[in-house]
Image (cartoon, coloured by chain):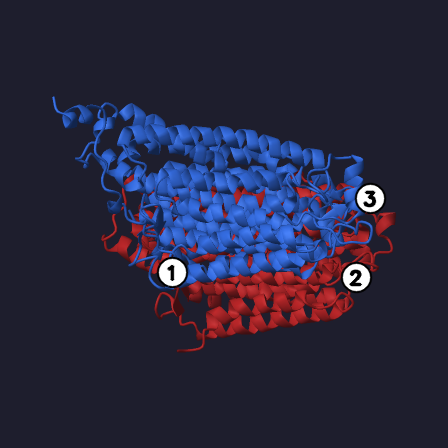
Amino acid sequence: MSTAVVHSLWTTAADPISKIGAPKIEYAQLAPTLIVVGAAVVGILVEAFVPRRSRYYAQLFLSVVALVAAFAAVVALAADGYGTTKAHIAAMGAIAVDGPALFLQGTILLSALVGLFTFAERRLDPEAHGSRVDSFAAQAASVPGSDSEKAAVKAGFTTTEVFPLLLFAVAGMLVFPAANDLLTLFIALEVFSLPLYLLCALARRKRLLSQEAAVKYFLLGSFASAFTLFGIALLYGYAGSVSYATIAQVVDGTVTNVSPALADTMGNDVLLLIGAAMIVMGLLFKVGAVPFHMWTPDVYQGAPTPVTGFMAAATKVAAFGALLRILYVVLPGLRWDWRPVMWGVAVVTMLGGAIVAITQTDIKRLLAYSSIAHAGFILAGVIATTPDGVSSVLFYLAAYSFVTIGAFAVVTLVRDAGGEATHLSKWAGLGRRSPLVAAVFAVFLLAFAGIPLTSGFAGKFAVFKAAAEGGAAPLVVVGVISSAIAAFFYIRVIVLMFFSEPRPEGPTVAVPSPLTMTTIGVGVAVTLVLGVAPQYFLDLASQAGVFVR
Amino acid sequence: MSFPLLTATAALPAIGAIATAAVPAARRNAAKALALFFSLATLVLAIVILVRFDPDGDRYQLTESRSWIAEFGVRYELGVDGIAVALIALTALLIPFIILAGWHDADPLETGNKRWRPTQGFFALILAVEAMVIISFEATDVFLFYIFFEAMLIPMYFLIGGFGDRAHEHGEETAATQRSYAAVKFLLYNLAGGLIMLAAVIGLYVVAGNFSLTEIAEARANGSLDMATNTERWLFLGFFFAFAVKAPLWPLHTWLPNAMGESTTPVAVLITAVVDKVGTFAMLRFCLQLFPEASKWATPAILVLAVISIIYGALLAVGQRDIKRLVAYASISHFGFIIMGIFAMTSQGQSGATLYMVNHGISTAALMLVAGFLISRRGSRLIADYGGVQKVAPVLAGTFLIGGLATLSLPGLAPFVSEFLVLAGTFSRYPVIGIIATFGIVLAALYTLVLYQRTMTGPVKPEVAAMPDLRARELLVVAPLIVVLIFLGVYPKPVTDIVDPAVKQTLSDVHKKDPQPEVEAAK
């Protein structure tokens, strides 16, 4: 037995080092994400090196520039045809640059931009010891009610870290719907979730409630992440790859080269079904679909309202984007298995959200349950499994995110001595005291309710039409019934605002700075434009409705 | 391209609504005048439509067509047939009177609040409703119609919930509660109806591939678009449900007495004389044309419901203690007649139904507005609170009587003609239904005359002794309406000439011919 033969028993010859090439990264095509990540990193440096009194302005400037630049990059890529003809998979198979990804990235960036303005609002809370403060805790680390908290408030501290945190979350969200392998998906999930958990804990007022919300969100979110990760492992075992395309091929049975290490498990349908179910569960948690919705009301209520608005809009956009890609790119071969399940989820989500919302007495919890019902409507479009289904979901997400951010921005304005007056009874007669604010909020509520001439109707019509054409007519009927139920509680709020007598000790409406005004103004404008003349945006969504694989 | 007359007619009140809403709080009277001006300008345009419309010309005239939402297959398509022209004219005619009648109804109680501008809001909302009603009469695209059919609910809802009678027998707080209850009930009923229709609209698109009424109706007629029997029936029911809520048809009527009872009289008139007409109009235009077979299938059931409406509405009207609720139940009875006329599937019945819509609008407006003047004087809606009014306010009592007589279809006043046509048209095909419906007329005489007797005759109640008679503004509202009622009662030909060809065509869509001998006899 020669030495060489003995050697080969427990070792194998490695390929020469020279054969490993540097990974090919298309930096230009990843520019939107890179810009945001870069700005977030710079933001941390700003925290470390810029004097406290100029940090706010530096951070605000940096964030606005980053988001605008990233949006410009998305537009440039789309204009260059990356959304349609030049759609392809970049970064060694990790990131898809295609229509849905660019459309959703654009939506996320714009909603982050208008959301950012509410983060930066400093005129709503009364001045603390002579310095203007925003909705965030003076010093996150100080224990609520402690002396150190009082000292921090007295010193006029503000948590300017929220800006880089927001940017990190946005970066994760940008990658999430574009991720083209399961590991990238998971990294993106964590990158956007962790800053959100933190942001939820940072409310200036009602800090305990805020911290409780953050802990709940973190614990439940971790469970969901763990499920997702386990699902990814199982799918890897099934397909021998984390790449979407390869898994899809294995599901279709068109793959030939079986990796020897995985020969035992590869193609095992049990792994596939359990793995896919777990990944989808993780994503349904993020979109807040029943029965994975339990966190939504508590977190929406406890989190600082600007964070709630941003989270409600952008998380939903990102998570639905990822869900669409998983279901349409990875698991189309499995659609006869997932469609019935998703039918069930959509039905209970629509009905559950709408019915439970009726009993709510807090405006933020009410909007939370309403967001659950809306997740159900969007799922109806997801189930269509047609190109129309994709574009209707894209359109719905864009329309919904602006209504949501606008609505939560209005919530930040209605205040009493304890901060925001979120209990519904306090909103009585708001239409008498501040007709304009009440009217704007009524527009948002009507859009949520899907009344024609608002974006909510165009979106609802689009998803229901796609669902009906995709053969899900019963789902449309359930959707219509839950819309009728949901209309009840939106209208109840309008009744309260306009037809009830104002209470003597009722809240006042704070006059915001141009920042929040911009947010609300953009919200109203988008709501009405998408309601009256949705043509251009529907075209855009339908051009963007094709996934690359 | 020619002047878009139909768009202009709908857009003018919409612009008026925005302009009125923008008037500053202190300039209340300017807002009122502005609203009146826009409603009169709209009336002028409606008259132009009436003149330019050629009854013997194409089915849809003054058509406009633009692309709108290609993604959904939706076009901005307008066009009017005789039925639509008559109803647009009715709407444009009534709105100035409604505005004039409600001149002081929305004056703010507190003048301190600079931001609160109820007057501007009131008149702007009325104009907004007018714009949406007119465009729903004009739309020949199902989606376009649906948008405004639904959107109309929002301004109506604010009109019902936001403005009530100044005086209320149970005090302001109860009034506000009842008002918002009525508004919510109105909205939920109609929204539920509309959402069911939405499912049917989507279903129609899946089946037909577009929303154009003319294209679909043509394809249905020449057989190129075949619907499965069950599909057609479900879609028909989806559409009909929404229209039956709006119209309203028993048993979907319960929102109407609340809404009419709690809102101010001009708004009550707006609901029953204008907005509800969209429901009956849409049955004629959409249900019959899009789903002819299903319409025939459903006819017996709908006729039975219509007759129940007629008798039930009339019986409940007899028992009412509240003047406005009485008129509301009477309207339910009248809507029963209209729906019966439509689904009798004879040209007499359908011409009668269309004429009925116009006449009912005018006669109810006359009766209800005078009742409103009465109520505002005494501060009570209860019949028992009145008595002997004709001795102190003879003109008021006289106009009230004419309005009442029109409601009970006295020969010589306009509603008689239409009620006769509806009954004759029904009788020629469904004699039993026709006979039962005739009892509705008897009951109508009962509730109207008893109402008159209890409020206007007898000893003068001390509370009404000082009641002033109609003022010039009020007379200006009532007198023209009465003139129109008498004119159309004696000479209905102008309206029937416009309506008849359109009805004939609608009837041919459902492949129904008039029963031969009866039509000959009527001619």
Q: How many other residues sit within 10 Å of disc 3, few (<14), some (14-19) or many (≥20)?
A: few
Q: Amino acid at mark 3?
A: Glu
Which circle marks residue A505 in the picture?
Answer: 3
Counting from the top left corner in percent of width and height, residue B330 is at: 60, 46
Please identify which colour was used for chain B in the image: red
Residue drawn at point x = 22 percent, y = 39 percent: A15
Q: Are marks 3 and 1 on the same chain?
A: yes
Q: Which residue is mark 1?
A: A78
A316 or A536: which is nearer to us? A316
Q: Confirm whether residue B258 shows in the render.
A: no
Which tag, 3 or 1, sits closer to the chain's start? 1
Which residue corresponds to the image point at 52% horizontal and 32% vertical from the top-left? Answer: A221
Task: Give the Cα separation between the discs numbered 2 and 1.
Answer: 49 Å
A425 w.r.t. B58: above or below: above
CB atoms at circles 2 and 3 under 8 Å apart? no
Tag 1, which chain? A
Give the amino acid type for the residue marked by disc 1 in the picture.
Ala
Residue under pointer 2: B114
Q: Nearer the viewer, mark 2 or mark 1?
A: 1
